[in-house]
Amino acid sequence: MVKAASVPRVWRDREVKYRLLGTYCKSCGKSHYPPRIYCPHCGSKDLELVKLPEEGKILHFTVIRAPPTDFEEYAPYIVALIELKNGTRLMAQVVDVRAEELKEGMEVEAVFRKYREQGPDGVIEYGLKFRPKL
């Protein structure tokens, strides 16, 4: 059974998911994804919402073969720790490539894709995933 998402929450989060927005700390110069209220590095609240780069490189990756219930139909899939061009790190799914073709340091770019479909009558969530840079 797929748990339904809150339509208002999906709507509120759309800009961050669709545009790859993060926060930039004016005190220490670090940027974060997802956006934060406080800087996890220095504790400052002097943050601004910024558009993050859509290109980066894979630091580490793994293949998910036994996913959570809501994602069983998508297995196996690849999840990677990605470092964006400005140094921001995030976890994201990697698509359009087989696991045996991936390697650490591989350059990737963001692409707009379907995250999941919550049942035949549920919300269809979209957002950014990453693929090897063409």
Image (spheres, rainbow, N blue to C red):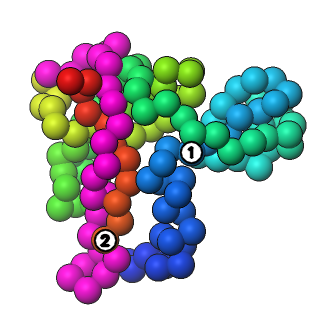
Q: Secondary structure at mark 2?
A: strand
Picture quadrant where residue 1 is located: bottom left
Whether the magenta-drawn stretch holds residue 33 is answered as no
Please state if 81 lies on the left or on the right of 26 as rendered: left
Whether the magenta-drawn stretch holds residue 113 is answered as yes
Which amino acid, mark 2?
Ile
Question: Magenta region: which residues?
Answer: 101-123
Which amino acid, mark 1?
Leu
Label annotation for residue 124 = 2
Which residue appears at 37% of the width and 47% of the height?
A: 128
Label annotation for residue 60 = none
Residue 106 pos. (x, y %)? 29, 17
Give the vertical position of 23 relative to 104 (above or below): below
The answer to whether residue 33 is visible is no
Please state if 41 lies on the left or on the right of 44 as rendered: left
Which residue appears at 57% of the width and 68% of the height?
A: 12
